[in-house]
Amino acid sequence: MDTQTKRPCDKHGEFTESCATCRAENFGPAWMGARQYPARLGEFRVQVLRLRGELNLEDQMKIRDLLEEFLRAGVVNVVLDLEQVTHLHMTGLPVLVRKARQLRDYKGDLKLAGASEYITHLLQLAGMGNEFGSHPDADAAVQAFRDNAK
């Protein structure tokens, strides 16, 4: 897909390959397009990635890379919206846990939103159920960041 047909971010008004926001808006069809929705809260931002489908190890590595780009851009508060995720491959979970811990080292966090009972059960089976803040939906997760900022 050339830059003419890619979705531009609000930051530039055009697609820029080096911009993490642009790349998130055009993440790719492998997992049906993660989307990022910034919400400005005081002096910091919360990035919400809306994910869908089955997330295999490769997809989770892409998420890790995107989280690393956010961190380099100074964004340390991230929500993974799992409301439309049907499966989360367990081998990729340690990758997400490491990123969550890294975000916490920078006074941020990685919160999960909208996880189904099945996804929650997978996290518990992997021994990682307590590694992430979990919320019923993305709005509640963003509100939790807002409440913690007060």
Image: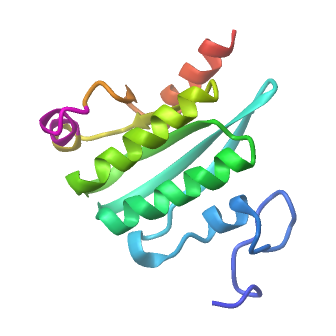
Question: Who's the residue at 18% across and 37% down the image?
Answer: 117
Question: Who's the residue at 40% across and 45% down the image?
Answer: 96
Q: Tell me where residue 27 appears, x and y as whole percent.
A: 56, 69
For this rendering, which residue is in front, 31 or 132? 132
Most frequent secondary structure within the magenta stretch: helix
Image position of 125 with respect to 58: above or below: above
Horizontally, is 92 left or right of 3 in the view? left
Image position of 75 with respect to 15: above or below: above
Q: Tell me where residue 105 appears, x and y as whole percent.
A: 57, 28
Image position of 45 with respect to 33: above or below: above
Query: Splitting the image into 4 quarters, where does residue 103 fall?
Result: top right
Q: Quadrant of the N terminus?
A: bottom right
Horizontally, is 94 left or right of 108 in the view? left
Q: Residue furthest right?
A: 12
Q: Residue furthest top?
A: 150
Q: Tell me where residue 21 appears, x and y as whole percent.
A: 71, 59
For this rendering, which residue is in front, 47 or 58? 58
Q: Residue furthest left?
A: 125
Q: Which residues are magenta?
A: 120-128
Question: Who's the residue at 52% across and 75% down the image?
Answer: 28
Magenta run includes residue 61: no
For this rendering, which residue is in front, 36 or 97? 97
Question: Who's the residue at 54% across and 20% down the image?
Answer: 144
Horizontally, is 136 left or right of 47 in the view? left
Q: Quadrant of the C terminus?
A: top right
Horizontally, is 130 left or right of 59 in the view? left
